[in-house]
Image (cartoon, rainbow, N blue to C red):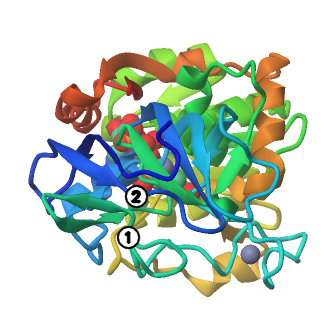
Amino acid sequence: ATAGKVIKCKAAVAWGPKQPLTIEDIEVAPPKAHEVRVKIVATGICRSDDHVLSGAISDMKFPAILGHEGAGIVESVGEGVKNIKPGDKVIPLFVPQCGECRCCTNVRSNLCDKHDIGPYRGLMLDNTNRFTCKGNPVYTFLSTSTFTEYTVLDEICVAKIDDNAPLDKVCLIGCGFSTGYGSAVKIAKVEQGSSCAVFGLGGVGLSVLIGCKVAGASKIIGVDTNSDKFAKAKELGATECINPNDYNEPIHEVLAKISDGGLDYTFECIGNTKVMESALKATHFGCGTSVIVGLAPASARVSVDPMEMLTGRTLKGALFGGWKSRDEVPQLVADFLAKKFELDGLITHRSTLDKINEGFDLLRKGDSIRTILQI
Ligand code: CND
Ligand code: ZN
Ligand code: ZN
C-alpha cells in the first residue's frame, strides 16, 4: 500500500564530523526507474561509517544518512527493475556491479564505474536525492545508506539473497565479513600451510582471519595494540597474537623472528599508513604479499623502499574483498547457510536505531566488534 507514495519514517541523520547522529523523521521518495526501495531490517556499524564522523573521510556532503552494512526486504521497485520484486530479501551493495563497464567486464576486477566511493556524490545514479528531512535534501552514503527504516537503492547496488537468510546476521556480508574474508581467499589467495599476519583485529581483521583459517593457513598471527582483542581472535583461528606495544623493536622484526624470516601474507585492517608500511616489511622477500584493507585518511601516503618490491614482494589492496558484488554476495549468503563459515563470533552487541550513538562509542572505545542495530 506504500508503493508509489512517499514514506515517512525514522532515520539516523549525520550533520557533520564530530557531531552525534540524531534520529529524525524523514521522507523517502518512491524508487524511480531502475531503483528499489528497501525496508532495512538490520545493519552493522563499520569503522568506515565512523571515518566520516571522525573526519578521516573528508569530502562528504552533509546532512547524510550513513551505514553500508545492512540487509532488508524490498518494499517496492521502480520501472524496468527485473529479477527483484517486493518481499525479496536483499543486501545493499556499496560496490555496484553494472555488468557493462570496463571493470565489470574484467574478471580480475570487482569495481564498477558507477561507484560512489570518493569523491562522494552522495546522490543516486541520476544525480538526484531520495531523502529529505524538514524539507531539505539529505545525502546518501556509499550508494547504500542503511541507518534508516527505508532506503532507496540503484538496482545495480542490490543483491537478492536466499529467503531463508537471517537478516540480523547476514547484514555483515554487506561489508565487514565479505571485505575481510575475500581479502584472504580472493585477493591474497592464501594457500594451505602458509603463514599469515593480520594487523587490526576488528570486524574486518577477524574476518580476514576466518578466511585464512578456511584457506588452511598453518600460522595465523593476530596483531593489535589492544590485547583485549586476542581472546576472540584465538577463538576464530589465530594461532598466536602479539601486541606491538610489548616490544621495543619494530613489529616487522618481531614477526620475522617468529615466521622464518617473514610471512607469506600480511593484511592491514586498520587504515594506518605506518602499519601498512610495516605489514609490507613483515612479508618474506621473494614471495610475500601484503594486502591493504584498511581505509586511510584521504591525505595520508605510504612510503615504500623500491627494494622491497624489487626483491619480490607484492603490495595489493581491495575494496569489498574483491567480490563481484551482485554475482557473489548471494553465493556468500548461501555459503553461510551451508555453514561454510560463521558470523556469530563477529557480533558482540545488539541494539536499536535510537541507540546508534552508543553503538559508535562501543566501536571507538574498542569494546565491540560489531553492534547490529535492529531497525
Ligand atoms: P575496528 O576499529 O573495529 O578495528 C581496528 C582494529 O585495529 C582495532 O582492534 C584496533 O585496536 C586496532 N589498531 C588500531 N591501531 C593499531 C595499530 N597501530 N597497530 C595494531 N592494531 C591497531 O575497525 P573495522 O574492523 O570495522 O575496520 C577496519 C578498517 O577497515 C577500517 O579502516 C575500515 O574503514 C576499513 C574498511 C575497509 C573496507 C574495504 O572495502 N576495504 C570496507 N570496510 C571497512
Ligand atoms: Zn565497511
Ligand atoms: Zn560496472
Crowd around label 2: few <14 · some 14–19 · many ≥20 (10 Å): many
Residue at (37% x, 52% y) in the render: 6
Residue at (47% x, 40% y) in the render: 2
- Whether pointer 1 and pointer 2 mark residues with C-beta atoms closer than 8 Å, the reply is yes
Residue 251 visible in the displayed image? no
Q: Relative to 126, does residue 229 appear above or below in the rendering?
A: above
In this picture, residue 20 sits left or right of residue 220: left
Crowd around label 1: few <14 · some 14–19 · many ≥20 (10 Å): some
Q: Nearer the viewer, residue 314 or 35?
A: 35
**Please, what is the three-letter code of the amino acid marked with disc 1?**
Asn
The percent position of residue 3, horizontal first and vertical second, equals 52, 46
List the residue tagged with mark 2: 29
Q: Relative to 244, does residue 95 appear above or below in the rendering?
A: below
The percent position of residue 57, horizontal first and vertical second, equals 31, 68
Q: Quadrant of residue 113?
A: bottom right
Ligand 3 contact, mark 2 (Cβ < 8 Å): no
Ligand 3 quarter of the rendering: bottom right
Badge number at residue 105: none
Which quarter of the figure is the C terminus placed in? top left
In this picture, residue 168 sits left or right of residue 63: right
- Total tally of numbered discs in the picture: 2
Residue 110 visible in the displayed image? yes
In this picture, residue 287 sits left or right of residue 70: right
The percent position of residue 88, horizontal first and vertical second, equals 70, 34
In this picture, residue 326 sits left or right of residue 349: right
**Please, what is the three-letter code of the amino acid marked with disc 2?**
Ala
Q: Relative to 50, does residue 104 appear above or below in the rendering?
A: below
List the residue tagged with mark 1: 129
Nearer-N-terminus badge (1/2): 2
Q: CA distance from mark 1 to mark 2?
A: 9 Å
